[in-house]
Amino acid sequence: MSATRPATKTELRDYALRRLGFPTIDINVASAQLDDLIEEAIDYYQEYHYNGSYKSFIKIEVTDAIKTAAKATAQIGSSAWYEDTQYVSLPPGVMSVNRVFSQIGASSVVPGNIFNIKYQIFLNDIYAMTHGHILHYFMTSQYLETLDWVTNNNANRRIRFNEHQGRLYLDFDWDELEAGDFILVEVLMRQDPETYTDMYNDNWLKDYVEALFQQQWGRNLSKYDGIQMLGGVTLNGRQILEDASQFKKDLEQNIRDTYEIPPMDLVG
């Protein structure tokens, strides 16, 4: 990468420092502080920028050990209350769980074998569809898929998930599953900049890292605000801090307005 297109954490740090005036100006921020601020910027980017995360599917094989652990309960403190521990652990980096499918296969209306409804409709109406009457088939297919989604309660399970716990709680009867079955989990994963290094070159992320560096620089200097240095130079850390804080605030507003994925609308 070029000097202005960072591909590593070190290159991003050096680039942000140069934008602040280094090495012409001494930036009074420790290396450990700079590394912490880059991690903070990456976390914020992953949580709110649409390029900071991606959809993925995790396949979990059901084993006897998982079934036994899922049926266990845990006492809440020293009280008489017990909490179900019907969960499976998910790998680090999972931000959210969208859906869980515990029975992956053909239903009565989704294509998968010659005996389902959709296949029979297609088989009997293939001649009509070749003469421009595809709208009726499309609308019927949509209706059947919606009917299957509503009535097939084994396809989409009730779930609970919290990123800090890393536990996917599955609220159903585990006796319905056998060892060797699979659970398919649709998740939102954090983008790893060490794997996909182009993330370090994102324009918003570079600006945000610079703002954090400048803010920390201002905080460090504000402790000596008003002190006159040799040559008559007076430290003005408070002004640097205020400018950086406004820059940071504007960037955070920008990512929420421009780059954040909007929430899904609920209809009905």
Image (cartoon, grey):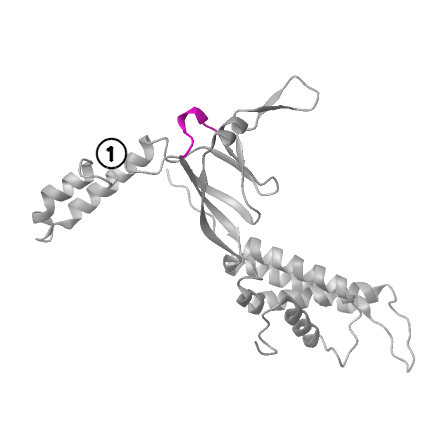
Give amino acid for label 1: Ser
Q: In this view, does 254 lie to the left or right of 176?
A: right
Q: Which of 15 and 181 is in front in this view?
A: 181
Q: Position of residue 54 (x, y in %)?
A: 48, 54
Q: Nearer the viewer, residue 109 or 26?
A: 109
Name which residue lies at 87% across and 75% down.
Answer: 234
Q: Is residue 260 left or right of residue 29?
A: left
Q: Where is residue 52 in the image (x, y as percent from the top left)?
A: 53, 58
Residue 173 can be seen, yes or no: no
Is residue 182 part of the magenta span, yes or no? no
State which quadrant residue 148 falls in. top left
Q: Where is residue 73 in the image (x, y as percent from the top left)?
A: 58, 23
Q: What span is colored magenta in the figure? A: 171-180
Is residue 175 part of the magenta span, yes or no? yes
How would you classify the magenta stretch by its main secondary structure? Answer: loop
Residue 148 can be seen, yes or no: yes
Q: Can you say whether 30 is above or below 186 in the image? A: below
Which part of the image, by quadrant, shows the N terminus?
A: bottom right
- SS class of the residue under badge 1? loop
Name which residue lies at 56% across and 58% down.
Answer: 192
Q: Where is residue 225 in the image (x, y as percent from the top left)?
A: 86, 67
Report the residue marked by disc 1: 108
